[in-house]
Image (tube, grey):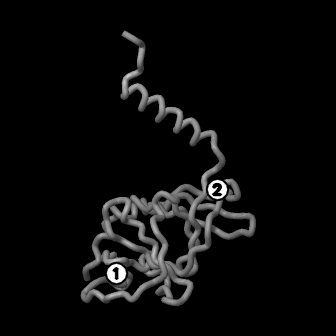
Amino acid sequence: MTDQPTLREFQQKLADRLNEAEQTSQPRALLAMESGKDKWLLDLADAGEVVPTPQLAAVPLTKPWYVGLANVRGNLFSVVDLSRFHGGEPTARDADSRLLLVGTRHGINSALLVTRVLGLKSLATLEIESAHDQQSWRGDRYCDAQGIRWTHLRIPQLLKARTFLEIGL
């Protein structure tokens, strides 16, 4: 009998090599966005799709930060105004505003209404200021060379947060 690796051994070796490559590769890039006056960073894997803000159907008896339902290619998404959710001003729905379809990867049709998407930002260009605060969905805080402060938005934690899930008055 030959010394052929089993499928499990092959998969484990492949996973180990991928982890090594990930750790030695260039610093990761995050999706940068603006929500109200705040700047946020999201892991690309959690960012989901970015779409122009469609018509939203209001849902009565919900909290002010829950702005309604959006139909995106035949699928309904629950939409939260990220700025209002964390205590800021309502997001203007204009040509720059976008919906981030953040929950699809996690089995939840949830979207965040944001002021604008700014593109990619490399962690290598940022200096960490502090670790995350008491809200599990707010990750580390960073500062860039221009003095702009960024907060890492932790989507899996946001989607599990009780305050995010309880939309009713």
Find residue 103 and report its image quarter: bottom left
Percent x, y of residue 67: 36, 84
**In the image, what residue type sits under mark 1?**
Asn
Residue, disc 1: 71
Is 28 positioned to the left or the right of 91 in the image?
A: right
* Furthest-top residue in this view: 1
Q: Secondary structure at mark 1?
A: strand
Mark 2 or mark 1: name the one nearer the start of the chain: 1
Q: Image height check: is 17 above or below 96?
A: above
Quarter of the C terminus within the rendering? bottom left
Q: Image height check: is 28 above or below 4?
A: below
Percent x, y of residue 2: 40, 12
* Furthest-right residue in this view: 145
Q: Pointer 2: residues within 10 angstroms few (<14), some, or many (20+)?
A: some
Report the Cα–Cα distance between label 2 and label 1. 34 Å
Residue, disc 2: 123
Q: Image height check: is 13 above or below 71?
A: above
